[in-house]
Amino acid sequence: MATKTFTSQLIKKAMAGFFLLTVLLTSCKKNDALVQTESQAGNETELVNAARSLEQTAAQSAAKEASTLGLTDLEQSNRSGNRNIVEIAISNSNFSSLVAAVVKTGLAGALSDASANLTVFAPVNSAFAQLPAPFNNAANIAAINDPAQIDFLRNVLLYHVLGAEVFSQQISGGRSAATTIKPSGTSNDNSIYFSKTFGLIRINGQSNVILANVNASNGVIHVINKVLLFPTSNIAQVVIGNPNFSSLLAALVKTNLASVFTGEGNFTVFAPTNAAFAKLPAPFNSAANIANISDPAQVAALSNILRYHVTGSRYFAWDLGILSKIETLADAPSKKVTTILGYNTGWVKGKGNSNFSSINPADVLTTNGVVHVIGDVLLP
């Protein structure tokens, strides 16, 4: 009888914990239900329309970017494939920063090797211009004399190269990955991730292929609009290093989930900011209050909420689809979140949320996954 009573008390506590995180989070009264439903419908319709517009224009926008840079003739002029990768890069002024980097790092010989069969994702000058000095233009790159900076730049360039020839049509639709020739420092820091949707190929959620399949005598070049930077931190380190995630960190520690994100893996984390947690009722609304939680039912409820923000594989913003249902690591039956893709952003909604939460920023690449920053806590 004592055991049954104790079990009954735990069940009641668990129900109370979930009640706090679901019912109490609904700030609207019953007579506001119609307004809430209309708001949700409007939010969803607007975002779906925006995603449908991207569906129609993404590939054309990439092609227009290539045309604006004067790259349109590059593919045609190299159909014969009688020039090697370096010769093609030298022949076009859009690659002066890339050429300077190749020379500075001593990779010209390897990329000119007649016996090689490579794939190079080649950033244009405007891609390098987005980097901090001294990596932002040809003149600054040529003037680098710090061995550590040269070594870093060499690894960045190797991170743009595959050891086999891969044309765009050989990249699978949807999500896929490839291993570059960059030496592995930590797990997954030499892998790149493709998102191929609506005719557009994005890499690591950041860089667009704006011109594909430039044929070379020793491989193929795909022109990209952002430099690919390999990850140096895992998910836990990203959370720990950002003060905007102090509530999330406290929740991960309280639920013993922090260690999950320190090792190897391929996760997607929709990471709520402190401002997102502040919208919740106490004791879930701040790092200090979360750290002081002692009720096992509240800890269990918080654990399930956190796992509802995590998937078991990598989804970049361009992979999120339009009203896709993506399964999380939360307990059944409420395991799926609804997502909408975006261009450098995206949107996600839990079953218990009224509206979609904007992802900003999106696609923070880590060694064990990808982090999307969101302004609301997702509710099962």
Image (cartoon, rainbow, N blue to C red):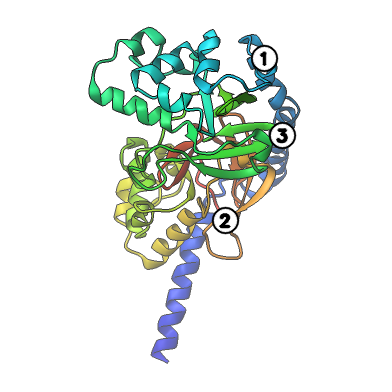
Q: Which is nearer the N-term, disc 2 or disc 3?
A: 3
x and y, in percent, of residue 109 in the image: 41, 24
Separation of disc 2 and disc 3 at Cα? 30 Å
**Residue that carries the numbered disc 2 in the rendered image:** 380
Label placed on residue 357: none
**Residue that carries the numbered disc 3 in the rendered image:** 198
**Residue that carries the numbered disc 1 in the rendered image:** 77
What residue is at 38 percent from the left and 52 percent from the top?
Answer: 261
Q: For this rendering, which residue is in front, 120 or 313? A: 120
What residue is at 36 percent from the left and 65 percent from the top?
Answer: 295
x and y, in percent, of residue 66 in the image: 64, 16
Residue 167 as seen in the image, left or right of residue 140: right
Mark 3 and mark 1 residues within 8 Å of each other at the beta carbon = no
Quarter of the picture containing the N terminus is bottom left
Q: Amino acid at mark 3?
A: Phe
x and y, in percent, of residue 373 in the image: 47, 38
Q: Which is nearer the N-term, disc 1 or disc 2?
A: 1
Which dot, 1 or 2, sits closer to the camera?
1
Question: Crowding at label 3, few (<14), some or many (≥20) Cα neighbours within 10 Å?
Answer: some
Q: For this rendering, which residue is in front, 251 or 76? A: 76
Q: Amino acid at mark 1?
A: Ser
Asked if 352 appears above or below 41 in the picture, the reply is below
Badge 3 marks a residue whose secondary structure is: loop
x and y, in percent, of residue 67 in the image: 67, 12
Q: Amino acid at mark 2?
A: Pro
